[in-house]
Amino acid sequence: MNCPKVSLLLPIYNVEKYIENCAHSLFKQSYCNIEFIFVDDCSCDNSVSILRNIIQQYPSRAKNVRILSHDRNRGVAAARNLAVEQASGDYLIWVDGDDYIDTDAVSLLVQRMQETGADIVLADAYFVYENRMIIRKIPLLESPQRYLELVLKRQIALSVWGKLFKKDLFCDVRFVEGVNFGEDYSVLPCLIYNATKIAKVDAPLYYYIQYNANSYTRNLTLNSLNQVCAANEHIASFFSDKNIDYEVLMLKSKLYLKLHLLKNVYKDKNLLKEVVNRYMEVDAMSIQLSWPDRIVFYLSKRHWYSLLTIYLNVALFSKKYVRFCF
């Protein structure tokens, strides 16, 4: 196997409790030809100081490390864009500052990409809780079209982390600055559309921390809901001039986004009302849905908030009715 250059990209913002473990996992990679690009989005803790101290422990890696800094806090989307623009590798991998990766992650992802000629290589992940870990497996996907369908339905992880991308896929794709909740979704469908082949390493390589109370996905607010919807509108704009059935595609996207949001905000009456009133033009009954999902939309359409809350609470508690992915 030859060793193409890999750019390992990491935005940093107030992750001092996690950055040490993360950085060690990056610098201990068995793959050699890596550049490390960290983007400090004006952290107000000791994240960058801790990172600099760890870099000194890896002199063979130090020359390939860059720490870029924003002059003001601009959000994770802007940090990701700067990392992409500065990357010089053939391939890109994202890692978040509160997570970490397997020692052989880069090597295995690159090997799989070279074996298959894929444009995107996926892998399973560990979801790490305070006292346990579980493996979240992703299906073996036959094509980019199938992958895109699952992403738009939010039935598969929407993240950019832990995947290997050919850098060329980003030629006309950037994160939407200001959309810092759901920013992955603002680009992942576009990257999949640009791809011709998908492959997978059938092993968990990424450790996704679930106990960081300060992470974006732990803090649902009206502002974060607006950002998720803005990401969806960005996707609609991207696909509007593509040679596909754009109208049906985006109707489904809006439908599944609304369903996803309802399942995640139902305990907050104000947020629930806000979500119910979004995408009212989408007719849920015109698209094939499971009966549990049809019931959610039936109650939502009639603004029966109390019944909707009770139904979702019982359905989700039963663990037979699964929340969609962020």
Image (spheres, helix red, strand yellow):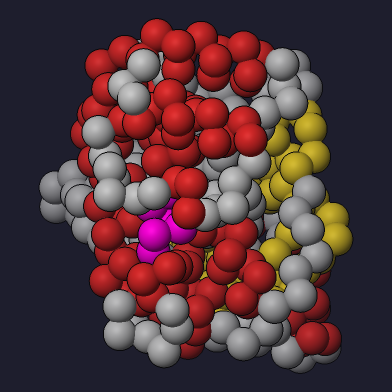
As drawn, 125 above or below 215: below
Secondary structure mainly formed by the magenta segment: helix
Q: Is residue 313 left or right of residue 299?
A: right
Relative image position of residue 70 (x, y in whole percent) = 20, 54
* Viewer-proximal residue among 21 and 212: 212
Residue 263 visible to an observer of this rendering: yes
Residue toward you, 56 or 256: 256
| Residue 247 image-quadrant placement | bottom left
Stretch of the chain drawn in magenta: 250-255
Location of residue 137 with respect to 252 vertically, above or below: above
Question: What is the quadrant of the N terminus in the image?
Answer: bottom right
Residue 78 seen in the figure? no
| Residue 252 shown in magenta | yes
Count of labels in the image: 0
Q: Within the image, what quadrant is residue 222 found in?
A: top left
Q: Is residue 112 magenta?
A: no
Question: Hey, which quadrant is residue 251 in on the image?
Answer: bottom left
Residue at horizontal 84 percent and vertical 55 percent from the top: 203
Q: Position of residue 264 (x, y in %)?
A: 46, 27
